[in-house]
Image: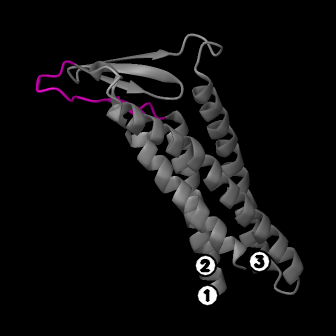
Amino acid sequence: MACCVLQITGLIFGGVGMVGTLATTIMKKKRVSAHIDSNIVVFETIWEGLWMDCVSHLGIRLQCKFYDSVLALPQPLEAFRALMCIAKKKTIISFLMAIVGVKYTHRTKEDSRGISVFILAAGVAFLLTGILVLIPVSWTAGSIIHDFYDPKVPTPLKRELGAALYVGWVSAALLIAAGAMYCSF
């Protein structure tokens, strides 16, 4: 019975982690403009994401623009895009493998080897996906923090951590937890 509860919990964690990975990939708020000066009247808020930049004017009007050229992007952004797309596909595959493993576990109690192969494969896939999500999210956060405290970076170009990074950290933690649960069988 405890085995079934742990499998269902791992499936829930993996499902929420999958949704978080998808949200992290498409969210526009990875880097958010920082308002550092004493000026409290802010007319524009700038959001930067993997796919587009957005500018909000007084919180009323939102203008978004996709990046012009894939070839003109900085190399870290290209790598982060690739890692997040791979993680997005891998998390869907991992979740489907976990569903098959849980269903197969409940159908056949006699064949424990078949059960462990599906569950172990889903666990390893969840662990790898969690690491794939964690790399670009943490690297982006590190570069934002480095640029924020760098005195050479002009104040209007300084950014703060956006909501997508927090969603990415939570989804990576849930995916790693789900992978650890499935690997423990």
Please tell me which of labels 2 and 3 falls first in the chain: 2
Q: Is residue 11 visible?
A: no
Q: Give neighbour class at mark 2: few <14, some 14-19, many 20+ (Cα, 10 Å).
A: some
Q: Nearer the viewer, residue 35 or 101?
A: 35
Name the secondary structure under disc 1. Answer: helix
Q: Which residue is mark 3?
A: 105
63 relative position to 174: left or right: left
Furthest residue in direction top, as rendered: 68
Left or right for 130, reference 120: left
Q: Residues within 10 Å of mark 3 (few under 14, many from 20)?
A: many
Nearer to the camera, 97 or 134: 134
* Percent of width and height locating residue 59: 23, 24
Disc 2 secondary structure class = helix
| Quarter occupied by residue 179 | bottom right
Queried whether the magenta region covers residue 32, the answer comes back as yes
Q: Which residue is mark 1?
A: 2
Q: Marks 1 and 2, Cα distance to the nearest angstrom?
A: 6 Å
Q: Is residue 72 left or right of residue 26?
A: right
Which residue occupies the foreground of this view, 103 or 59?
59
Locate residue 81, reporting x and y percent: 62, 32
Note whether residue 110 is visible. Answer: yes
Q: Could you tell me if the residues under marks 2 and 3 are in contact, i.e. CB atoms within 8 Å?
A: no
Q: Which residues are magenta?
A: 27-43
Secondary structure character of the magenta stretch overall: loop
Q: Which residue is mark 2?
A: 6
Q: Amino acid at mark 1?
A: Ala
